[in-house]
Image (tube, rainbow, N blue to C red):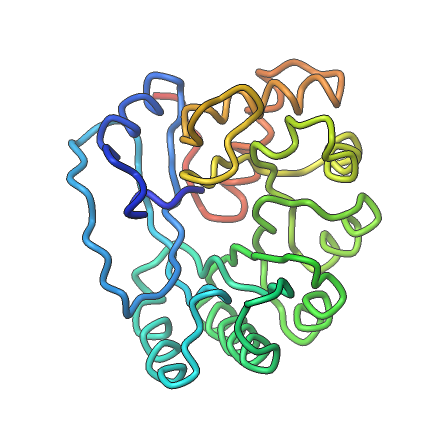
Amino acid sequence: MAHLDDPRIVDANAMVKRAGAAGVRDIINAGVDPTLKRPWPSIAPSSVRIPRAVVLHPLFIDQARLGEQLAAVEKSAEAAIAIGEIGLDSRDGAPRWELQLQACRAQLGIARESKRAVILHCVRAWEPLLGLLNETSVHGIVHGFGGSAQILPRLEQLGILPSFGGAVSYPTRRRAREAVRLATRFCLESDAPDHAPHGVPVSEPAAIVTTAQTVAELQGRSIRDVLADSAACAEALFGLSVAPR
């Protein structure tokens, strides 16, 4: 998962080329607000597929335009591979809590009705998010998973798997690293342009290999098996082909 249309990315085409050279097959481009109409970067045809997700990200909620924003998500759902990043964020300065709950609940319903996977965003809001997930039946991932290992089985019972990004490569992220050690089904992501792995200057899809190496070390497995498991989970959740090219 990445945000290739983020204005902070200077050369998305070069980024995708490096991803292909690193063996990346698919980059799900996550949305933030379908009413923003971000220009899509010029990306040359390559072996890397870039399916898109649509969503109203909790940090992009506009109270005055919330109805318009949610209507745009619903209109775009059928053409999208997933609904994401959807979720809850309790940090200071985030939109009002009741608006976040309203937007998240509505988009979980859109995902259910359109039979699309969800890409979940959660910052210090696990119990409220689990409560919303219990109200509906969806499947998908929690992107950039930073929760405790104890949350993993509760999520999996609801059809939700963790997705690990570059943050798990930092020794200080003890809770997330413990979750990595215990996770049996998971995806890997870059979340470019954010959350670069330790020692990597810029977050990009090619750096997922560094994240995979961290996961392999924490689980005592080979990086090849870790990448294969991540690909298999992506296939199951998002319907992405993992056939070798």
Image vertical order of residue 79 relative to residue 238, above or below: below
The spot of residue 228 in percent (x, y) is 56, 25
Q: Residue furthest front?
A: 93
Marker count (numbered):
0
Image vertical order of residue 124 relative to residue 72, above or below: above
Instruction: Tell whether 115 sits left or right of 180.
Output: left
Q: Which residue lies at the image location 38% right of the left edge and 57% below the top edge?
A: 31
User: Which quarter of the rendered picture does the C terminus lie within?
Assistant: top left
Instruction: Tell whether 14 sits left or right of 201.
Output: left
Quadrant of the image occupied by residue 25: top left
User: Which quarter of the rendered picture does the N terminus lie within?
Assistant: top left
Q: Which residue lies at the image location 65% right of the left edge and 53% below the top edge?
A: 160
Q: Which residue lies at the image location 72% right of the left edge and 52% below the top edge?
A: 156
Q: Which residue lies at the image location 60% right of the left edge and 82% below the top edge?
A: 98
Instruction: Tell whether 213 sits left or right of 106.
Output: right
Image vertical order of residue 207 relative to residue 89, above or below: above
Instruction: Tell whether 198 sits left or right of 202.
Output: right
Q: Residue furthest right?
A: 150
The spot of residue 201 in percent (x, y) is 45, 24
Quadrant of the image occupied by residue 176: top right
Instruction: From the viewer's side, name the closer residue of 146 and 183.
Output: 146
The spot of residue 155 in percent (x, y) is 72, 55
Quadrant of the image occupied by residue 66: bottom left
The spot of residue 21 in percent (x, y) is 33, 17
